Image: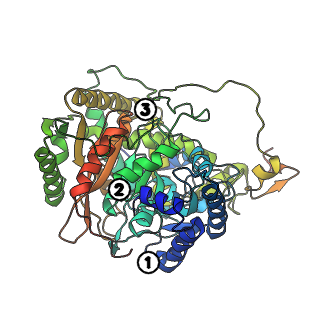
Amino acid sequence: MKLTEMRAELDAKNISAAELAQEYIKKIHDTDGKVNSYITVCADEAAAAAEHAQSLIDSGNSKPMTGIPVSIKDNICTKGIKTTCASHMLDDFVPVYNATVIEKLNSEGAVILGKTNMDEFAMGGSSQTSYFGGVKNPYDTSRVSGGSSGGAAASVSAGLCAAALGSDTGGSVRQPSAFCGVTGLKPTYGAVSRWGLIAFASSLDQIGVIANSAADTGYVLNCIYGQDKNDATSSARAQGNYTAKVGSDIKGLRIGLPKEFFGEGISDEVKTAVMNAAEYYKKLGCELVECSLPSLEYAVSAYYLISSAEAASNLSRFDGIKYGFRSGLGEDYNSLISSSRREGFGDEVKRRIMLGNYALCSGYYDAYYKNATMIRTQLRSEYAGIFEKCDVILTPTAPTAAYKIGEQENDPVKMYLADICTVTVNIAGLPGISTTCGYDKNNMPIGMSLVGRAFDEQTIIAVCDRFEQDFERKEARIR
Amino acid sequence: MFDAEMTRHLAELSKIEFTADELEKMTADMTGIIALMDKVCGFDTSVKPYALDAVDYKELRSDSHEDSYDTEDIIRNADNVKNNSFVVPKVV
Protein backbone atom coordinates (compact mmCIF):
# COMPACT_ATOMS: atom_id res chain seq x y z
CA MET A 1 0.00 0.00 0.00
CA LYS A 2 1.34 3.45 -0.92
CA LEU A 3 1.79 5.91 1.94
CA THR A 4 -0.76 8.26 0.38
CA GLU A 5 -3.26 5.37 0.40
CA MET A 6 -2.38 4.52 4.00
CA ARG A 7 -2.96 8.18 4.89
CA ALA A 8 -6.39 8.07 3.20
CA GLU A 9 -7.33 4.83 4.98
CA LEU A 10 -6.38 6.30 8.36
CA ASP A 11 -8.17 9.60 7.73
CA ALA A 12 -11.29 7.77 6.47
CA LYS A 13 -11.11 5.70 9.68
CA ASN A 14 -11.24 2.46 7.74
CA ILE A 15 -8.43 1.42 10.06
CA SER A 16 -7.31 3.02 13.30
CA ALA A 17 -3.71 3.99 14.02
CA ALA A 18 -3.71 1.46 16.88
CA GLU A 19 -4.93 -1.37 14.65
CA LEU A 20 -2.34 -0.54 12.03
CA ALA A 21 0.49 -0.41 14.59
CA GLN A 22 -0.67 -3.66 16.20
CA GLU A 23 -0.79 -5.36 12.81
CA TYR A 24 2.85 -4.44 12.14
CA ILE A 25 4.02 -5.33 15.67
CA LYS A 26 2.34 -8.74 15.38
CA LYS A 27 3.97 -9.32 12.01
CA ILE A 28 7.36 -8.36 13.43
CA HIS A 29 6.93 -10.85 16.27
CA ASP A 30 5.75 -13.56 13.86
CA THR A 31 8.27 -12.98 11.05
CA ASP A 32 11.36 -11.08 12.07
CA GLY A 33 13.04 -14.14 13.55
CA LYS A 34 13.69 -15.17 9.94
CA VAL A 35 15.43 -11.93 8.86
CA ASN A 36 16.64 -10.30 12.13
CA SER A 37 15.90 -6.81 10.86
CA TYR A 38 15.08 -5.31 14.27
CA ILE A 39 17.35 -4.95 17.31
CA THR A 40 14.67 -3.37 19.50
CA VAL A 41 10.91 -3.57 19.00
CA CYS A 42 8.99 -0.76 20.71
CA ALA A 43 5.54 -2.27 21.18
CA ASP A 44 4.55 -0.10 24.17
CA GLU A 45 5.94 3.12 22.71
CA ALA A 46 4.25 2.34 19.38
CA ALA A 47 0.89 1.80 21.12
CA ALA A 48 1.22 5.15 22.91
CA ALA A 49 2.25 6.91 19.68
CA ALA A 50 -0.68 5.33 17.84
CA GLU A 51 -3.08 6.59 20.52
CA HIS A 52 -1.69 10.11 20.10
CA ALA A 53 -1.93 9.77 16.31
CA GLN A 54 -5.56 8.72 16.56
CA SER A 55 -6.38 11.77 18.66
CA LEU A 56 -4.89 13.95 15.90
CA ILE A 57 -6.94 12.11 13.27
CA ASP A 58 -10.13 12.27 15.33
CA SER A 59 -9.74 16.02 15.84
CA GLY A 60 -9.12 16.59 12.13
CA ASN A 61 -5.51 17.59 12.71
CA SER A 62 -3.70 14.74 10.99
CA LYS A 63 -0.49 15.45 9.11
CA PRO A 64 1.10 13.36 6.33
CA MET A 65 3.00 11.04 8.71
CA THR A 66 0.30 10.80 11.42
CA GLY A 67 -0.16 7.13 12.34
CA ILE A 68 2.33 5.88 9.69
CA PRO A 69 4.39 2.99 11.16
CA VAL A 70 8.12 3.42 10.56
CA SER A 71 11.37 1.77 11.58
CA ILE A 72 14.50 3.68 12.60
CA LYS A 73 18.10 2.60 12.05
CA ASP A 74 19.77 1.97 15.38
CA ASN A 75 22.36 4.73 14.98
CA ILE A 76 19.70 7.47 15.15
CA CYS A 77 19.15 8.66 18.71
CA THR A 78 15.73 8.02 20.22
CA LYS A 79 15.12 9.45 23.69
CA GLY A 80 14.43 6.70 26.19
CA ILE A 81 14.86 3.94 23.59
CA LYS A 82 18.11 1.99 23.31
CA THR A 83 20.35 3.14 20.46
CA THR A 84 23.12 0.59 20.04
CA CYS A 85 24.79 1.18 16.66
CA ALA A 86 24.70 -2.65 16.61
CA SER A 87 27.79 -2.57 18.84
CA HIS A 88 28.72 -4.15 22.15
CA MET A 89 30.16 -0.72 22.94
CA LEU A 90 26.63 0.78 23.07
CA ASP A 91 24.48 -2.26 23.72
CA ASP A 92 22.90 -0.62 26.79
CA PHE A 93 23.04 3.01 25.68
CA VAL A 94 19.82 4.99 26.11
CA PRO A 95 19.97 8.52 24.60
CA VAL A 96 18.72 11.47 26.60
CA TYR A 97 17.57 13.32 23.51
CA ASN A 98 15.93 12.69 20.15
CA ALA A 99 17.62 13.18 16.80
CA THR A 100 16.09 16.07 14.85
CA VAL A 101 14.52 13.61 12.39
CA ILE A 102 12.81 11.83 15.30
CA GLU A 103 11.49 15.14 16.64
CA LYS A 104 10.11 15.87 13.18
CA LEU A 105 8.47 12.45 12.88
CA ASN A 106 7.02 12.81 16.38
CA SER A 107 5.72 16.28 15.60
CA GLU A 108 3.61 14.75 12.82
CA GLY A 109 2.49 11.81 14.97
CA ALA A 110 4.38 9.03 13.17
CA VAL A 111 4.52 5.65 14.94
CA ILE A 112 8.01 4.27 15.59
CA LEU A 113 7.87 0.47 15.61
CA GLY A 114 11.48 -0.16 16.58
CA LYS A 115 15.18 0.20 15.90
CA THR A 116 16.72 -1.69 13.02
CA ASN A 117 19.82 -3.82 12.74
CA MET A 118 22.89 -2.66 10.82
CA ASP A 119 26.62 -3.10 10.39
CA GLU A 120 28.39 -2.05 13.58
CA PHE A 121 28.68 1.76 13.61
CA ALA A 122 27.40 1.71 9.99
CA MET A 123 30.74 0.36 8.76
CA GLY A 124 30.06 -2.33 6.19
CA GLY A 125 28.02 -3.40 3.21
CA SER A 126 26.54 -6.68 4.42
CA SER A 127 24.95 -6.05 7.87
CA GLN A 128 26.81 -9.12 9.08
CA THR A 129 29.10 -7.22 11.48
CA SER A 130 26.26 -6.49 13.92
CA TYR A 131 26.85 -7.47 17.55
CA PHE A 132 23.25 -8.72 17.47
CA GLY A 133 23.73 -11.15 14.56
CA GLY A 134 23.53 -10.55 10.82
CA VAL A 135 20.49 -9.47 8.80
CA LYS A 136 19.15 -11.97 6.27
CA ASN A 137 17.74 -11.05 2.90
CA PRO A 138 13.93 -11.45 2.73
CA TYR A 139 14.25 -12.70 -0.88
CA ASP A 140 16.59 -15.51 0.16
CA THR A 141 17.58 -15.87 3.80
CA SER A 142 20.85 -17.59 2.87
CA ARG A 143 22.00 -14.25 1.40
CA VAL A 144 23.06 -10.94 2.91
CA SER A 145 20.71 -7.96 3.14
CA GLY A 146 23.44 -5.53 2.13
CA GLY A 147 24.39 -2.69 4.41
CA SER A 148 24.96 -0.89 6.45
CA SER A 149 21.22 -0.10 6.67
CA GLY A 150 20.43 -3.79 6.07
CA GLY A 151 17.85 -4.00 8.83
CA ALA A 152 16.06 -0.91 7.51
CA ALA A 153 15.92 -2.31 3.95
CA ALA A 154 14.92 -5.80 5.10
CA SER A 155 12.19 -4.37 7.36
CA VAL A 156 10.62 -2.62 4.35
CA SER A 157 11.16 -5.56 2.01
CA ALA A 158 9.57 -8.04 4.45
CA GLY A 159 6.61 -5.73 5.11
CA LEU A 160 7.62 -5.11 8.73
CA CYS A 161 7.12 -1.32 8.48
CA ALA A 162 5.64 1.14 6.00
CA ALA A 163 8.91 3.04 5.60
CA ALA A 164 12.30 3.25 7.27
CA LEU A 165 14.99 5.77 8.10
CA GLY A 166 18.57 4.71 7.43
CA SER A 167 21.88 6.48 7.03
CA ASP A 168 24.18 6.61 4.03
CA THR A 169 27.89 7.41 4.30
CA GLY A 170 29.11 5.54 1.21
CA GLY A 171 26.00 3.76 -0.08
CA SER A 172 24.45 2.42 3.10
CA VAL A 173 20.88 3.33 2.14
CA ARG A 174 21.08 2.62 -1.59
CA GLN A 175 23.00 -0.68 -1.66
CA PRO A 176 20.84 -2.59 0.88
CA SER A 177 17.76 -1.19 -0.87
CA ALA A 178 19.08 -2.70 -4.10
CA PHE A 179 19.84 -6.05 -2.43
CA CYS A 180 16.42 -6.22 -0.72
CA GLY A 181 14.37 -5.08 -3.74
CA VAL A 182 13.07 -1.77 -2.34
CA THR A 183 13.67 1.94 -3.00
CA GLY A 184 16.32 3.90 -1.10
CA LEU A 185 16.92 7.64 -1.22
CA LYS A 186 20.13 9.32 -0.06
CA PRO A 187 19.36 13.06 0.02
CA THR A 188 21.86 15.81 -0.77
CA TYR A 189 24.42 16.42 1.98
CA GLY A 190 22.80 19.11 4.13
CA ALA A 191 19.19 18.40 3.14
CA VAL A 192 18.48 16.51 6.37
CA SER A 193 19.85 17.37 9.80
CA ARG A 194 22.46 14.95 11.16
CA TRP A 195 21.81 16.04 14.76
CA GLY A 196 21.39 12.85 16.76
CA LEU A 197 22.81 10.58 14.08
CA ILE A 198 25.75 8.90 15.81
CA ALA A 199 28.65 10.16 13.74
CA PHE A 200 30.72 7.89 11.52
CA ALA A 201 32.21 10.26 8.91
CA SER A 202 30.69 13.68 9.41
CA SER A 203 31.48 15.14 5.97
CA LEU A 204 29.78 12.17 4.26
CA ASP A 205 27.00 10.95 6.60
CA GLN A 206 23.42 11.64 5.57
CA ILE A 207 20.11 10.30 6.87
CA GLY A 208 17.98 8.78 4.11
CA VAL A 209 14.68 7.02 3.51
CA ILE A 210 13.91 3.44 2.47
CA ALA A 211 10.38 2.64 1.29
CA ASN A 212 8.36 0.62 -1.19
CA SER A 213 8.50 3.27 -3.92
CA ALA A 214 10.25 6.45 -4.99
CA ALA A 215 7.12 8.48 -4.29
CA ASP A 216 7.03 7.07 -0.75
CA THR A 217 10.65 8.09 -0.11
CA GLY A 218 9.76 11.65 -1.17
CA TYR A 219 6.67 11.53 1.05
CA VAL A 220 8.80 10.76 4.13
CA LEU A 221 11.55 13.20 3.12
CA ASN A 222 8.90 15.94 3.12
CA CYS A 223 8.65 15.41 6.88
CA ILE A 224 12.33 15.12 7.86
CA TYR A 225 14.18 17.63 5.62
CA GLY A 226 15.26 21.13 6.52
CA GLN A 227 17.87 23.35 8.09
CA ASP A 228 18.51 22.82 11.78
CA LYS A 229 20.36 25.07 14.20
CA ASN A 230 21.92 21.98 15.77
CA ASP A 231 23.62 20.95 12.50
CA ALA A 232 25.75 23.71 11.01
CA THR A 233 26.06 21.75 7.75
CA SER A 234 22.30 21.54 7.20
CA SER A 235 21.12 23.85 4.47
CA ALA A 236 18.28 26.23 3.73
CA ARG A 237 18.56 25.19 0.07
CA ALA A 238 16.52 22.06 0.79
CA GLN A 239 13.17 23.11 -0.61
CA GLY A 240 10.75 20.29 0.25
CA ASN A 241 7.70 19.26 -1.77
CA TYR A 242 9.70 16.26 -2.93
CA THR A 243 6.89 14.53 -4.78
CA ALA A 244 5.96 17.66 -6.77
CA LYS A 245 7.28 16.34 -10.08
CA VAL A 246 5.95 12.78 -9.73
CA GLY A 247 3.80 12.00 -12.76
CA SER A 248 5.22 14.79 -14.90
CA ASP A 249 6.40 14.18 -18.46
CA ILE A 250 10.10 13.28 -18.65
CA LYS A 251 10.37 13.53 -22.44
CA GLY A 252 13.58 15.30 -23.45
CA LEU A 253 15.29 14.58 -20.13
CA ARG A 254 19.03 14.00 -20.59
CA ILE A 255 20.28 10.88 -18.80
CA GLY A 256 24.03 10.51 -18.42
CA LEU A 257 25.65 7.07 -18.53
CA PRO A 258 29.23 7.37 -17.21
CA LYS A 259 31.13 4.66 -19.05
CA GLU A 260 33.37 3.80 -16.07
CA PHE A 261 30.33 2.42 -14.19
CA PHE A 262 29.74 -0.20 -16.86
CA GLY A 263 33.27 -1.61 -17.07
CA GLU A 264 35.27 -4.35 -15.42
CA GLY A 265 34.05 -5.60 -12.05
CA ILE A 266 30.36 -5.03 -12.77
CA SER A 267 28.49 -8.29 -13.42
CA ASP A 268 26.99 -8.81 -16.87
CA GLU A 269 23.55 -9.34 -15.40
CA VAL A 270 23.73 -5.98 -13.61
CA LYS A 271 24.98 -4.17 -16.74
CA THR A 272 22.20 -5.68 -18.85
CA ALA A 273 19.45 -4.80 -16.35
CA VAL A 274 20.62 -1.18 -16.00
CA MET A 275 21.05 -0.75 -19.77
CA ASN A 276 17.53 -2.16 -20.28
CA ALA A 277 16.30 0.57 -17.92
CA ALA A 278 18.22 3.14 -19.98
CA GLU A 279 16.49 1.85 -23.14
CA TYR A 280 13.13 2.14 -21.36
CA TYR A 281 13.81 5.81 -20.69
CA LYS A 282 14.90 6.28 -24.30
CA LYS A 283 11.56 4.90 -25.49
CA LEU A 284 9.84 7.52 -23.32
CA GLY A 285 11.71 10.23 -25.19
CA CYS A 286 14.68 10.73 -22.91
CA GLU A 287 18.08 11.37 -24.41
CA LEU A 288 20.89 8.98 -23.37
CA VAL A 289 24.21 10.80 -23.06
CA GLU A 290 27.50 8.94 -22.85
CA CYS A 291 29.76 10.64 -20.33
CA SER A 292 32.79 9.97 -18.18
CA LEU A 293 33.91 10.16 -14.56
CA PRO A 294 37.64 9.55 -15.11
CA SER A 295 38.63 9.70 -11.43
CA LEU A 296 36.28 6.88 -10.44
CA GLU A 297 39.32 4.60 -10.26
CA TYR A 298 40.55 6.55 -7.21
CA ALA A 299 37.16 6.82 -5.52
CA VAL A 300 37.11 3.76 -3.27
CA SER A 301 40.54 4.46 -1.81
CA ALA A 302 39.81 8.18 -1.35
CA TYR A 303 36.48 7.35 0.28
CA TYR A 304 38.00 4.89 2.76
CA LEU A 305 40.81 7.27 3.68
CA ILE A 306 38.51 10.24 4.28
CA SER A 307 35.75 8.29 6.04
CA SER A 308 38.17 6.31 8.22
CA ALA A 309 40.12 9.43 9.20
CA GLU A 310 36.87 11.04 10.32
CA ALA A 311 35.76 7.82 12.03
CA ALA A 312 39.03 7.57 13.98
CA SER A 313 38.28 11.01 15.39
CA ASN A 314 34.53 10.54 15.89
CA LEU A 315 34.89 7.19 17.65
CA SER A 316 37.55 8.43 20.06
CA ARG A 317 34.66 9.45 22.35
CA PHE A 318 34.00 5.79 23.15
CA ASP A 319 36.34 5.32 26.08
CA GLY A 320 34.29 3.21 28.48
CA ILE A 321 34.11 6.07 30.95
CA LYS A 322 31.34 8.54 30.10
CA TYR A 323 28.96 6.01 28.54
CA GLY A 324 29.09 2.71 26.77
CA PHE A 325 30.81 -0.55 27.59
CA ARG A 326 33.53 -0.51 30.26
CA SER A 327 36.00 -3.37 30.55
CA GLY A 328 36.78 -4.77 33.97
CA LEU A 329 40.38 -5.35 32.94
CA GLY A 330 41.88 -1.86 32.91
CA GLU A 331 44.11 -1.27 35.91
CA ASP A 332 45.24 2.22 34.95
CA TYR A 333 43.57 5.03 33.04
CA ASN A 334 44.99 4.21 29.59
CA SER A 335 44.49 0.47 29.85
CA LEU A 336 40.90 1.02 31.01
CA ILE A 337 40.27 2.83 27.72
CA SER A 338 42.23 0.48 25.45
CA SER A 339 40.76 -2.69 26.97
CA SER A 340 37.23 -1.24 26.80
CA ARG A 341 37.78 -0.44 23.11
CA ARG A 342 39.28 -3.88 22.49
CA GLU A 343 36.27 -5.66 23.95
CA GLY A 344 33.65 -3.12 22.89
CA PHE A 345 34.45 -2.76 19.18
CA GLY A 346 34.26 -5.45 16.50
CA ASP A 347 37.03 -6.21 14.00
CA GLU A 348 35.80 -3.97 11.15
CA VAL A 349 35.43 -0.94 13.41
CA LYS A 350 38.97 -1.52 14.68
CA ARG A 351 40.29 -1.74 11.11
CA ARG A 352 38.65 1.58 10.19
CA ILE A 353 40.03 3.34 13.27
CA MET A 354 43.51 1.95 12.55
CA LEU A 355 43.28 2.99 8.88
CA GLY A 356 42.09 6.46 9.82
CA ASN A 357 44.97 6.99 12.20
CA TYR A 358 47.38 5.67 9.56
CA ALA A 359 46.05 8.21 7.03
CA LEU A 360 46.51 11.05 9.52
CA CYS A 361 49.91 9.90 10.78
CA SER A 362 52.89 12.18 10.47
CA GLY A 363 54.82 11.08 7.40
CA TYR A 364 51.77 9.52 5.71
CA TYR A 365 49.29 12.41 5.85
CA ASP A 366 50.38 14.08 2.59
CA ALA A 367 50.49 10.87 0.59
CA TYR A 368 47.14 9.56 1.80
CA TYR A 369 44.71 11.99 3.45
CA LYS A 370 45.76 15.06 1.49
CA ASN A 371 45.66 13.21 -1.82
CA ALA A 372 42.25 11.80 -0.92
CA THR A 373 40.86 15.31 -0.34
CA MET A 374 42.27 16.41 -3.70
CA ILE A 375 40.49 13.47 -5.33
CA ARG A 376 37.31 14.61 -3.61
CA THR A 377 37.67 18.04 -5.22
CA GLN A 378 38.40 16.44 -8.59
CA LEU A 379 35.35 14.13 -8.42
CA ARG A 380 33.10 17.07 -7.54
CA SER A 381 34.44 18.93 -10.52
CA GLU A 382 33.88 15.96 -12.84
CA TYR A 383 30.29 15.59 -11.63
CA ALA A 384 29.71 19.32 -12.22
CA GLY A 385 30.97 18.84 -15.78
CA ILE A 386 28.57 15.96 -16.39
CA PHE A 387 25.62 17.98 -15.07
CA GLU A 388 26.32 20.69 -17.64
CA LYS A 389 25.09 18.29 -20.30
CA CYS A 390 22.85 15.91 -18.34
CA ASP A 391 19.88 16.26 -15.98
CA VAL A 392 20.35 12.98 -14.12
CA ILE A 393 22.93 10.20 -14.12
CA LEU A 394 22.10 6.48 -14.29
CA THR A 395 24.45 3.84 -12.84
CA PRO A 396 24.27 0.40 -11.24
CA THR A 397 23.83 0.55 -7.43
CA ALA A 398 26.17 -2.39 -6.77
CA PRO A 399 28.44 -4.57 -8.91
CA THR A 400 26.35 -7.69 -8.13
CA ALA A 401 23.08 -8.73 -6.54
CA ALA A 402 23.06 -10.02 -2.93
CA TYR A 403 25.63 -12.75 -2.33
CA LYS A 404 25.58 -15.72 0.04
CA ILE A 405 26.24 -15.07 3.72
CA GLY A 406 29.90 -15.89 4.40
CA GLU A 407 30.92 -15.55 0.74
CA GLN A 408 32.85 -12.28 0.84
CA GLU A 409 32.14 -10.22 3.95
CA ASN A 410 35.21 -11.60 5.72
CA ASP A 411 37.53 -10.16 3.07
CA PRO A 412 37.83 -6.41 3.80
CA VAL A 413 39.49 -5.47 0.50
CA LYS A 414 36.82 -7.25 -1.53
CA MET A 415 34.12 -5.58 0.55
CA TYR A 416 35.64 -2.12 0.07
CA LEU A 417 35.90 -2.57 -3.71
CA ALA A 418 32.19 -3.50 -3.86
CA ASP A 419 31.35 0.12 -2.87
CA ILE A 420 32.58 1.47 -6.21
CA CYS A 421 29.11 2.36 -7.55
CA THR A 422 27.93 4.42 -4.58
CA VAL A 423 30.81 6.23 -2.82
CA THR A 424 31.27 9.07 -5.32
CA VAL A 425 27.76 10.35 -4.63
CA ASN A 426 28.68 10.88 -0.96
CA ILE A 427 32.08 12.30 -1.86
CA ALA A 428 30.35 14.87 -4.10
CA GLY A 429 27.45 15.42 -1.64
CA LEU A 430 24.81 14.68 -4.29
CA PRO A 431 21.37 13.05 -3.99
CA GLY A 432 20.93 9.47 -5.23
CA ILE A 433 18.05 7.02 -5.35
CA SER A 434 18.14 3.27 -5.96
CA THR A 435 15.30 1.14 -7.24
CA THR A 436 14.94 -2.39 -8.57
CA CYS A 437 15.46 -2.69 -12.35
CA GLY A 438 15.68 -6.46 -12.77
CA TYR A 439 16.41 -9.84 -11.20
CA ASP A 440 19.41 -12.10 -11.60
CA LYS A 441 19.39 -15.82 -12.37
CA ASN A 442 18.82 -16.52 -8.67
CA ASN A 443 15.77 -14.24 -8.66
CA MET A 444 17.65 -11.71 -6.52
CA PRO A 445 16.86 -8.01 -7.13
CA ILE A 446 19.25 -5.85 -9.15
CA GLY A 447 19.40 -2.14 -8.31
CA MET A 448 19.97 0.92 -10.45
CA SER A 449 20.77 4.38 -9.14
CA LEU A 450 19.69 7.80 -10.37
CA VAL A 451 21.94 10.65 -9.26
CA GLY A 452 20.84 14.28 -9.42
CA ARG A 453 22.16 17.77 -8.99
CA ALA A 454 22.57 18.99 -5.43
CA PHE A 455 19.17 19.64 -3.81
CA ASP A 456 17.30 18.38 -6.89
CA GLU A 457 15.72 15.35 -5.21
CA GLN A 458 12.43 16.24 -6.93
CA THR A 459 13.78 15.24 -10.34
CA ILE A 460 15.39 11.93 -9.39
CA ILE A 461 12.31 10.90 -7.41
CA ALA A 462 10.09 11.66 -10.42
CA VAL A 463 12.37 9.88 -12.90
CA CYS A 464 12.65 6.89 -10.59
CA ASP A 465 8.87 6.83 -10.07
CA ARG A 466 8.33 6.81 -13.85
CA PHE A 467 10.34 3.60 -14.15
CA GLU A 468 8.59 2.00 -11.18
CA GLN A 469 5.16 2.67 -12.78
CA ASP A 470 5.91 0.17 -15.56
CA PHE A 471 8.26 -2.22 -13.77
CA GLU A 472 6.74 -5.32 -12.22
CA ARG A 473 8.38 -6.02 -8.87
CA LYS A 474 8.50 -9.50 -7.44
CA GLU A 475 7.66 -9.63 -3.77
CA ALA A 476 10.17 -11.00 -1.28
CA ARG A 477 9.59 -14.59 -0.18
CA ILE A 478 9.28 -13.40 3.38
CA ARG A 479 6.57 -10.76 3.39
CA MET B 1 55.91 -1.19 4.18
CA PHE B 2 53.22 -2.11 6.69
CA ASP B 3 54.45 -4.37 9.49
CA ALA B 4 53.72 -5.45 13.05
CA GLU B 5 55.64 -2.45 14.39
CA MET B 6 53.33 -0.10 12.51
CA THR B 7 50.30 -2.00 13.81
CA ARG B 8 51.59 -1.56 17.37
CA HIS B 9 52.10 2.17 16.74
CA LEU B 10 48.60 2.59 15.32
CA ALA B 11 47.10 0.51 18.15
CA GLU B 12 48.65 2.95 20.61
CA LEU B 13 47.32 5.96 18.69
CA SER B 14 43.92 4.28 18.41
CA LYS B 15 43.88 3.28 22.09
CA ILE B 16 42.96 -0.29 21.22
CA GLU B 17 44.60 -3.23 22.96
CA PHE B 18 45.48 -6.33 20.90
CA THR B 19 46.68 -9.77 21.90
CA ALA B 20 49.64 -11.21 19.96
CA ASP B 21 47.30 -13.26 17.73
CA GLU B 22 45.01 -10.30 17.12
CA LEU B 23 48.01 -8.14 16.27
CA GLU B 24 49.18 -10.65 13.69
CA LYS B 25 45.72 -10.86 12.09
CA MET B 26 45.35 -7.05 12.10
CA THR B 27 48.76 -6.66 10.45
CA ALA B 28 47.74 -9.06 7.68
CA ASP B 29 44.39 -7.28 7.16
CA MET B 30 45.96 -3.83 7.18
CA THR B 31 48.67 -4.86 4.70
CA GLY B 32 45.98 -5.68 2.14
CA ILE B 33 43.97 -2.55 2.94
CA ILE B 34 46.98 -0.21 2.69
CA ALA B 35 47.86 -1.77 -0.68
CA LEU B 36 44.40 -0.73 -1.86
CA MET B 37 44.82 2.77 -0.37
CA ASP B 38 48.14 3.17 -2.21
CA LYS B 39 46.02 3.88 -5.28
CA VAL B 40 45.61 7.52 -4.20
CA CYS B 41 49.38 8.00 -4.28
CA GLY B 42 49.21 7.73 -8.09
CA PHE B 43 46.75 10.62 -8.45
CA ASP B 44 48.12 13.59 -10.37
CA THR B 45 47.98 16.28 -7.70
CA SER B 46 49.02 19.09 -10.02
CA VAL B 47 45.66 19.30 -11.76
CA LYS B 48 43.37 21.18 -9.40
CA PRO B 49 43.27 23.35 -6.33
CA TYR B 50 41.54 21.52 -3.51
CA ALA B 51 39.66 22.20 -0.33
CA LEU B 52 40.95 20.40 2.76
CA ASP B 53 37.76 21.21 4.56
CA ALA B 54 35.08 20.20 2.12
CA VAL B 55 32.27 20.75 4.59
CA ASP B 56 30.28 23.81 3.73
CA TYR B 57 29.13 25.30 7.02
CA LYS B 58 25.89 27.19 6.57
CA GLU B 59 25.12 28.93 9.79
CA LEU B 60 26.84 28.54 13.13
CA ARG B 61 24.88 28.79 16.36
CA SER B 62 25.34 31.90 18.44
CA ASP B 63 27.61 31.29 21.41
CA SER B 64 24.96 31.77 24.05
CA HIS B 65 23.85 29.95 27.17
CA GLU B 66 21.03 27.47 26.74
CA ASP B 67 19.49 25.00 29.14
CA SER B 68 21.20 21.63 28.91
CA TYR B 69 20.32 18.13 30.04
CA ASP B 70 19.98 17.00 33.65
CA THR B 71 23.20 15.64 35.10
CA GLU B 72 21.26 12.67 36.44
CA ASP B 73 20.13 11.76 32.91
CA ILE B 74 23.58 12.23 31.42
CA ILE B 75 25.43 10.02 33.91
CA ARG B 76 22.85 7.24 33.76
CA ASN B 77 24.69 5.69 30.80
CA ALA B 78 28.02 5.56 32.62
CA ASP B 79 29.20 2.34 34.22
CA ASN B 80 30.84 3.76 37.34
CA VAL B 81 29.64 7.02 38.87
CA LYS B 82 30.12 8.54 42.31
CA ASN B 83 28.93 11.95 43.52
CA ASN B 84 27.89 12.95 39.98
CA SER B 85 31.42 12.16 38.71
CA PHE B 86 32.84 9.42 36.50
CA VAL B 87 35.09 7.08 38.44
CA VAL B 88 38.40 6.18 36.75
CA PRO B 89 41.58 4.46 37.97
CA LYS B 90 43.94 6.71 39.90
CA VAL B 91 46.11 8.75 37.49
CA VAL B 92 48.59 10.38 39.87
User: In percent of the image, x 49 and y 30: which residue is there?
Assistant: A235
Q: Chain of mark 3?
A: A
**Distance between mark 3 and mark 1 Cα atoms:** 45 Å
Circle 2 crowding by C-alpha within 10 Å: few under 14, some 14–19, many from 20: many
Of residues A254 and A271, the one nearer the viewer is A254
Sequence order check, earlier mark of 3 and 1 = 1
Q: Indicate the amino acid at tag 2.
A: Ser
For disc 2, the chain is: A
Do the residues marked 3 and 1 share a common chain? yes
Q: State which quadrant residue B49 falls in.
A: top left
Q: Where is residue A433 shown, x and y percent of the image?
A: 33, 47
- Under circle 2, the secondary element is loop
Q: Is residue A83 left or right of residue A206?
A: right
N-term-proximal mark, 3 vs 2:
2
Q: Chain of mark 1?
A: A
User: On the image, numbered disc 1 is attached to which residue?
Assistant: A34
| Residue A213 disc label | 2
Which of label 1 and label 2 is nearer to you?
A: 2
What amino acid is found at the position of numbered circle 3 in the picture?
Answer: Tyr
Q: Circle 3: is it few (<14), some (14-19), or many (20+) Cα within 10 Å?
A: some
Measured as percent of width and height from the top left, residue A449 is found at 27, 48
